[in-house]
Image: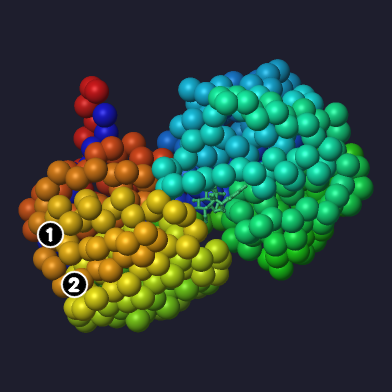
Amino acid sequence: MVRYRVRGGNALRGTAFIQGAKNAVLPMIGAALLAARGRTVLRNVPIIEDVRRAVELAEAVGAKVELHEKERTLVIDASELTSPVLPAQIARRFRGSVLFVPALLHRLGEAVIEGVGGCNLGSRNLDFHYLGYKRLGAVVNEGDAVIHVKAAGFTGATLYLDTPSHTGTENLIMAASLARGTTVIENAALEPEVLDVIDMLTRMGAKISGGGTGFITVEGVEELHAVEHTVMPDRLDAGVFAMAAAITGGEVNLVGADLDHLGVVRYKLEQMGVEFADHGAVLHVRRDRPLRPINVITDTYPGFATDLQSPIMAIACLADGASYIHERIFDGRFALASELNKMGADIEVKENSAVVRGATPLRGTEVTAHDLRSGIALVLAGLAAEGETVIESGYLINRGHSYLAERMQALGADVEQEISAP
Ligand SMILES: CC(=O)N[C@H]1[C@@H](OP(=O)(O)OP(=O)(O)OC[C@H]2O[C@@H](n3ccc(=O)[nH]c3=O)[C@H](O)[C@@H]2O)O[C@H](CO)[C@@H](O)[C@@H]1O
Ligand SMILES: C=C(OP(=O)(O)O)C(=O)O
């Protein structure tokens, strides 16, 4: 059992190092399994629980994987994949397990999906993935518990996504990369992580054009080869550390953060009173004035990232006036509200909208992380609360943030991670 203990009141100051992106490294591990020869080297790998699960899953299908934690480097040898089964006990613990399917289909001709996990945010459908595989020539059998996909080689086709799914786009690009002929994917995702994955696949020998336009063309090739690739910085980790400065009225330097990757999040924080100064690869963030309330509508990139909706809700509690938050990506992403209300917030949720009436002082208490981002939002709330906030389960936070307590402590925060027997 992992829990975080946060004692509030310190304004954060100093330098934080932004980790590599969770949502880029997971598809890259899936992509590494497409290479039948050689070893893939991934650098700037975040040391998070999702990466540990991805390593276990890659080993379960037969890859040889070394995770060098100190060097933040993964070495993956996928020359012999032996099993098409994504076992439930690993696959159900993280969303990224779905990104192993294209490699299993190309390398073994089938994938047996015993489960797919990820944050519990309401409906998290995979129909665009399965429809895409079918249009490329696969047969999909959706049983009650297990999904079998079989493909004796893919043939290029025109595919579209009803909405620009992040992992859906990555999976269909990977499936199309080794298909016979040309595939066109319409309404593809624009997220920077998708572009980083395209960059890696391109260096592996894939022929992909149109990344970042929403309209991607993939010319299938015969084989992909192992490469070395450095994972891009995690814009969500950067957003969280910027918000930690914002909620405590602090001033931090974020090494490796890319202001452009924050999209609309940057402008919303500026409206709240946060200042950003871009010094090349170091982003300076400070807040030295009262917080103003905000209206947020989540959207796909470059809109306001849904994964930063929970953290900004925590800040909104301290803004003077009513903030309005509308969640458009997931239909169940407001579990945080009742936890913040336990800390003294005044948040009302109606369907996919929330009104946060501030400013309400926050008090530390025992609260529950219902998912990764509500967990980190509670850490932020704890940094600004009076007294001690205890957050369980810390595992969910560790799914996406590496060395959180250490990095927060380096900024002067009183944050500890406790591990105890369950
Ligand atoms: C590992 C990873 O990269 N996770 C990210 C990814 O999740 P993920 O790729 O799962 O998110 P999607 O973009 O696919 O899902 C967004 C919405 O589209 C719907 N949908 C999606 C696919 C599909 O086949 N059918 C369907 O209806 C989902 O139910 C959801 O409501 O993007 C999310 C949205 O930015 C982020 O919150 C997650 O951090
Ligand atoms: C929703 C998230 O992750 P996942 O898709 O891995 O569940 C997240 O990172 O906030």
Q: Nearer the viewer, residue 226 or 184?
A: 184
Looking at the picture, how far across and down is residue 332, in whole percent?
A: 40, 51
Kindly tell me whether mark 2's CB lies below 8 Å from ligand 2: no
Q: Residue at left 78%, top 39%? A: 134
In the foreground, 142 or 27: 142
The amino acid marked with disc number 2 is Gly
Amino acid, disc 1: Gly
Q: Earlier in the sequence, mark 1 or mark 2?
A: 1
Residue at (51, 51) in percent of width and height: 21
Q: Position of residue 99 (x, y in %)?
A: 63, 39
Residue under label 1: 344
At mark 1, the secondary structure is loop
Query: Badge 2: few (under 14), some or many (20 or more) residues near its Cα, within 10 Å?
Result: many
Which element type, helix, strand or loop, lies under badge 2?
strand
Residue with the most extreme right position: 181
Residue occupying the point 72% across, 37% down: 102
- Please state, as top left, top right, bottom left or bottom right, where the C terminus lies in the image: top left
The answer, for residue 41, to whether it is visible in the render is no
Q: Residue furthest left?
A: 387
Cα gap from disc 1 to disc 2, whole angstroms: 10 Å
Residue denoted by label 2:
358
Closer-to-camera residue (20/240): 240
